[in-house]
Image (tube, grey):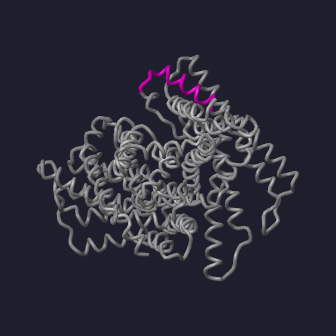
Amino acid sequence: MSHGMIASLGFVALFALMVLRVPVGIAMGIVGVGGFAAVNGFWPGMSLLMNSPLSTATDYTLSVIPMFVLMGVFATAGGMSRELFDACRTWVGHRRGGMAIGTILACGGFSAINGSAIATTATMATTALPEMRRAGYPADMAAGTIAAGGTLGVIIPPSIVMIIYGLLTQQDITRLFMAGVLPGVVAILIYIITVRLLVWRNPGQYEVSPRQPWSARLASLRNIWAILLLFVVVIVASFGGLVTITEAAGVGAVGAGLIGWLRGRLTLRTMLDCMIEALRITASIFIIAIGAYLFGYFLTVTQVTQAFVALMLDLPIGPYGVLSLILVLYIILGAIMDELAILLLTVPIVYPVIMTLGFDPIWFGVVVVMTITLGLITPPVGMNVFVLNSIARDLSLGRIYRGVAPFILADLLRLALIVAIPWLSLALPNAF
Amino acid sequence: MNRLAHWIEQCAGLLLGAVALVTVVEVVLRQFFGLQVPDAYTLAGYFQGIAIFWGIAIALLAGRHITVDALWTACGPRLRVLIDIFATFMSALAMTALTFMMWRKVSSTFSSGETTYELGMLLWPVVLCATAGAGFGVLLALFRLRILARRLADGTTDNYETP
């Protein structure tokens, strides 16, 4: 059987296994080992299982993932998101739609210490959604705001998805984090504009809270010292080169736990629960990473990547045409698959094309993360929407999708801006 | 079985906490005292590896791994259980192959007497602990398979996600 045939059968098998709900990582592993064995023989294929999974799981550079996950879980359990939301509401709550704007700002702030969209969405759904509904905001708009705001967890550093991209492409994770800062700010601004437009269309639906005095506003900032401290320690220490990004993540995890414990928000029991939660998230990420590494061997022996690069370069549509094609593919995949799985499955194939076309790898990292983030709020499988639906059971998926629709348009506009103006992504990493 | 899984999950969670602690101790000693913990990051990596293999095993029982649910959500309850049975069977098969090959790795590491670079600690117990996690994954996948098969036979078709 030719390598091309094995590759085609491998991809068919992979998608069949995934559609039949075999865990993505296991499906990738099965096809990786099976495909390698089809080319090189049974035992050479099986021998991949002897070393690759263990070396992936014990790789200390990958510790950056569980450490940032643990930091986010501690921060959530320690009530930091609530304080952030209260502070943001105190500052902007007197504006029409101010509570929704406050939610977006709180999502952005919380994302600076938490790299998961789902965690950001879940925590804001329990904090901000009841407040907005109590204030009479339309439920679908309130839910849409939180679902969209939750995606900031992936864009604003530290971002688990960006870490995975960095590890896959061997790009400096600190530079990638720097690259995500300005696009993150752009995302917040565009979401705020979206909220303002929604309010402008139906101003009567949005109550205005009384304006808070400056003393109350400044007092609200006192409560967010913990988030600022964590952000400074983790991001500034790693951006400044004092510690590696993995070390910064470890310090952030212990710091978040310690702060929660010293403030009496976390007991030893809840800290253990946090570690279990972090383990659950980490295990589900690592099984995909293990599968992706095995799948990588299959790609190498069947030379799929080279064939894909040649195919893309032969298309008479130019570099930006190829890029657009790839981004459309990501949007489609994002609608049905988990963002980490998409990244681990496709980046080894797509990245060489992007490099051959001469695009910047850091910029592409931001672009690809922004693109697959769309999948978190688009039907049929918008994970943030599902999370909201699981917390606010009285809100149907249809209503939440309706509420999130204006933010999808905002995301597409943001993506166009990030693609058209690479400076937004590259200004900070190039400045340091 | 669920209680055992929970107990193991606690131990694995503590190992993940240990990775964070080792990292902080290493950073503090290096930055403030110019000292280094021998094999700190090697040990942290091994803690992580063991925790992950046990975590993967327990996620198999709970059906908590990341999956593509597009077809599954569109199916009726009975078909959903059938899909879950197939997926769990494939997972059990994959974990069996992994455990078998990792066991060979235990044997080879034991025979070679491989050690860590600085402390000279034997590595085979670490590989054995990780392999035991993978093996436990096979057991848990089979346990889940049994539960799903019973539910199919009984006509109980609500989701089985978390023990």
Residue A333 falls left or right of residue A221: right
Prevalent SS, magenta region: helix
Residue B1's quadrant in the figure? top right
x and y, in percent, of residue A156 in the image: 40, 60
Going 56% across and 73% down the picture, which residue do you hit?
Answer: A243
The answer to whether residue A387 is visible is no
Residue A269 falls left or right of residue A213: right
- When the figure is inspected, residue B23 is found, relative to residue A352, above or below; the finding is below
**Magenta span contains residue A73:** no
- When the figure is inspected, residue A429 is found, relative to residue A131, above or below; the finding is below
**Magenta span contains residue B88:** yes
Going 82% across and 65% down the picture, which residue do you hit?
Answer: B120
Q: Which residues are magenta?
A: B74-90
Going 61% across and 32% down the picture, which residue do you hit?
Answer: A2
- When the figure is inspected, residue B157 is found, relative to residue A190, above or below; the finding is above
Residue A363 falls left or right of residue A7: left
x and y, in percent, of residue A193 in the image: 21, 57
Going 50% across and 30% down the picture, which residue do you hit?
Answer: A19
Quadrant of the frame with the C terminus of chain A: bottom left
